[in-house]
Image (cartoon, grey):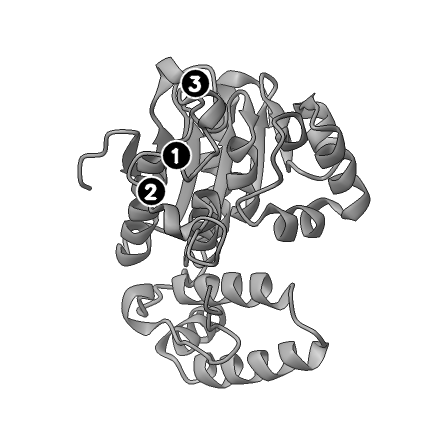
Amino acid sequence: MPEFSTISTDIEDAILTITLNRPDKLNAFTREMMHELIAAFDLADADDAVRAVIVTGAGRAFCAGADLSAGASTFDYEKRAGWNPEAVGNSAYRDGGGMLTLRIFNCRKPVIAAINGPAVGIGATMTLAMDFRLASEAARIGFVFSRRGIVPEAASSWFLPRIVGIGQALEWVYSGRVFDAAEAERGGLVRAVHGPDDLLPAARAFARSLTNDTAPVSVALARQMLWRMMGASHPMEAHRLESRAMYSRGRSNDAKEGITAFLEKRASAYPDRVSADMPHFAPWMDDPDY
């Protein structure tokens, strides 16, 4: 793994742990952190030794939101250093949080957020493209945009209602209030709440339960199928995609191994690799242009 400045990475037991690593700034999100997180997900997809990804924060916070060190002009992109003023106000400008969540959306490995502390703004919305969110009892979560004079970002207007329902999403977004982990669990945002010392062990155990006995390509393909079909206009789209995927995987070496191992009552040793054997089915797995 390369050296990063705003995150750290570690691979153990086929799990890549990405840690947001600006603890003195409560892991506040910067443009550099966005680029480094995207690069880490690129590496995760390319490395067949990685079966799952966990994202957590260093110190007492998960991510306190955008770095506000620029003060009142933090979200004034025309004044931001290095930004092209001609791009502001037209289709050339892209939200950095959205660029990150779209990359996570395309990830080929299960992704788990281990929310160890405060997660507000982009600290909350970046987790929505992750498959599961586990929270510490110390976690505090807030979609605080209305209290900063801005709007939801990171494609959260697509993700959040699909995860918790439109009513709960609107309540949290309208009010902009910060709420505790217990409310996040009741609202369907987090899968489970753990003691601070138990959070990462629980996340790792959960990751292993998803990957220990499963075919990597099957998991990767299923992740894309389920996420992408959330936006499908009709179940026929799912039928079209699933029919092609079943045809492709049904004649794969993984399918032969999985069935043989089941009949022989032994553990499977799946030979296919995500980096080389993951099929792509257009147009269902194509990304639209910005």
Seen from the viewer's position, the closer of residues 232 and 49 is 232
Residue plotted at (58% across, 78% down): 242
Mark 2 Cα shell of 10 Å, populated few (<14), some (14-19), many (≥20) = few
* Furthest-right residue in this view: 167
Residue plotted at (67% across, 38% down): 189
Q: Three-letter amino acid code at disc 1?
A: Lys
* Furthest-left residue in this view: 2
In the rendered view of the protein, which quadrant contains the N terminus? Answer: top left
Q: Which residue is mark 2?
A: 83
Q: Which residue is mark 3?
A: 26
Q: Nearer the viewer, mark 2 or mark 3?
A: 2
Residue plotted at (26% across, 54% down): 47
Quote the CA–CA distance across marks 2 and 1. Answer: 7 Å
Give me the disc on residue 79: 1
Location of residue 101 in the rendering, given as x and y in whole percent from the top left corner: 48, 48
Please say if the residues under marks 2 and 1 sit with CB atoms less than 8 Å apart. Answer: yes
Vertical arrangement, residue 202 with respect to residue 242, above or below: above
Location of residue 201 in the rendering, given as x and y in whole percent from the top left corner: 46, 28
Location of residue 102 in the rendering, given as x and y in whole percent from the top left corner: 47, 54
Quote the CA–CA distance across marks 2 and 3. Answer: 25 Å
Location of residue 237 in the rendering, given as x and y in whole percent from the top left corner: 64, 79
Please say if the residues under marks 1 and 3 sit with CB atoms less than 8 Å apart. Answer: no
In what element is the residue under mark 3?
Answer: loop
Q: Earlier in the sequence, mark 1 or mark 3?
A: 3
Q: Three-letter amino acid code at disc 3?
A: Leu
In what element is the residue under mark 1?
Answer: loop
Q: Nearer the viewer, mark 1 or mark 3?
A: 1
